[in-house]
Amino acid sequence: MSWRQSAAVLLLALCGAAMLPFQGRLAREAQAAYFQKTLLDIDLRERIGQAGFLAALSGFRSPLAAILWIDAHSAWENTEWGRMAGLFDTVTTLQPRSLTYWDMAAWHMAWNASTAAMQNEKQPSEALRIKAQREYFNLGRDFLERGIKNNPDRSELYLQLAVLLRDKFEDHCAAAEAFAKAAAFSDAPPYAARFACYELAKCPGREREAYEKLRALWLQGEKQRLPSLINFLRELENRLDIPAAARIDSAPAHPQN
Amino acid sequence: MRLAGVVWAIGRNTLTELVRQKVFYFLLIFALLVIGNSAFIAKLSFQEQFQMLKDISLGAMSVFGALVAILATANFLPKDMEDRTIYTILAKPVPRHCYLLGKLCGILALLAVAIFLMSGVFIAVLWIRESAVLAETRVQFASAPPEELALAVKEVTASTFNANLLPGILVIFIKSALLASLTLFLSTFATSSIFTILMAVALYFIGHLQATAREYWLSGLDVEWWSRFLAALVSLLFPDLQAFNLTDDIIAGTAVPLKLFLGTAALGGIYIAVYFALSALVFSGREL
């Protein structure tokens, strides 16, 4: 090795040392902006094999996730629910920031797999079929909750969780909370706030709160005065015995500014 | 000024030479991959389709960029020596570092053109798929109120193009340029292109583990001295390639803060400059 080569290696090490703080700061900034959050651990290594793990380590997480997703789609066509759940788990571990993967995984589990479990002709016991169905509901919920944990800065998964809680678990209080969380985001669809109130209206003991929120929406003007909202308000007015003068039917058609 | 002209001439010549070697044929494979993938995933939901298309296309761009960078750079020094063109060039008043810089600029130009063309293919296929999905959506929502149609169209367009794809593609270019510069440094040591390619590929993998080694070294864990020494060695001598893997999360919809993008670009620029300077140092004393 010539002195120039030795000097080059030494200089390289010195430059490396000088860049360490910058590299560390950049890594922290990336983590704060939700980049590179994937946990590449032994568990993932066992699930995707050595070649897959090497690809994931080398910056090919997203193509690997795409290939496994296509595999999961084939499993869906063959109604291999168990294999699908495993593949979804791996895909979402590889790409935890992809809302599509969390959302679709939850939908497949809570809607498709649960229905298939309920209609499983090989299982004569209805109790066991219901149990299997509940397990798939829980699996769907688990995907959405983990998705939210990885994407707390986006509204979409809160919305999906709210729909799941409303339609499959019939837990209106929890659904109201999830819709309200989604509505708090600036990019949330306008129906999120309304749906949060509808669910709150079905939550025992929180009718008064629901009424006040729905009325506040109603007072915002024509855009919020949809048939469902008006129906919910009228029903709550009756249940809460709201005086006739304060009811929406006696209010002016257009809000006063 | 004269040296800039020399660098320009060598760079232009390098690019012409590489184009004549039919390097761009790989674009056909890229196009086949993207178009084939797009046809295969047509049965999935539109969100899945666009996600897959971006995953596969940007992943392939990253692979092809790295391959072109390593193979084109590893090959030029041994080839110039075999053809004896290097002797003709260096016999003129051309400093060795200008020769290397010209070559590196030629390769970077090749990478820029290649990534630009691949981006063009990718965006064209994405646009065609988007148009098809939008047409389907308009038919499905023909009888729906205009607000619902507008919402559905917005959902489709939001899943396809977003401004973050551009920094993602630029980061792929920066990473490829860094690999070219690293391979140039290796080739000044090496005696054959095979050695350079093997070393560059090995460094590519090690570079992706540099961040892990750095964290391990700096975490201050009470471990064997040799284990910490190895981690320190990896941290100091190898580039942090993991820092350039922003594309995976960009595809998933994560927005890149400008500060993070500029920091990553600056890191890439520093690495390129350092590897080039060290290549010039080693090459200035090399016996030809």
Image (cartoon, rainbow, N blue to C red):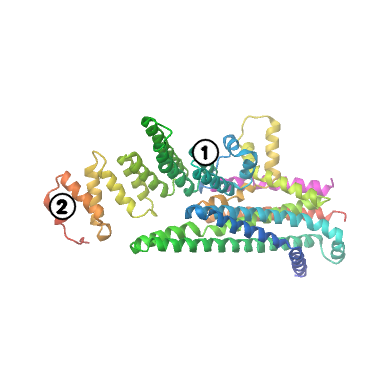
Q: Position of residue B191 (x, y in %)?
A: 84, 50
Horizontal placement of A84 versus B226: left or right? left
Image quarter of residue B215: top right
Disc 1 marks a residue whose amino acid type is Arg
Q: Is residue B195 above or below residue B7?
A: above
User: Does the magenta-highlighted stretch encompass residue A4?
Assistant: yes
Q: Nearer the viewer, mark 1 or mark 2?
A: 1
User: Does the magenta-highlighted stretch encompass residue B104?
Assistant: no
Q: Is residue B26 above or below residue A155?
A: below
Q: Position of residue B178 (x, y in %)?
A: 68, 54
**Residue identified by numbered label 2:** A247
Q: Chain of mark 1?
A: A
- Between B226 and A219, the residue placed more toward the observer is A219
Q: Which segment is the magenta one?
A: A1-30
| Secondary structure of the residue carrying numbered label 2 | loop
Horizontal placement of A180 versus B170: left or right? left
Residue at x-position 34% and y-position 47%: A179
Q: Quadrant of the C terminus of chain B?
A: bottom right
Q: Quadrant of the N terminus of chain B?
A: bottom right
- Between A25 and A247, the residue placed more toward the observer is A247
Circle on res. A195: none
**Residue identified by numbered label 1:** A83
Residue at x-position 37% and y-position 43%: A164
Identify the main secondary structure in magenta. helix
Disc 2 marks a residue whose amino acid type is Arg
Could you give the CA–CA distance between mark 1 and mark 2, rounded to whole angstroms?
55 Å
| Secondary structure of the residue carrying numbered label 1 | helix
Q: N-terminal of the two: label 1 or label 2?
A: 1
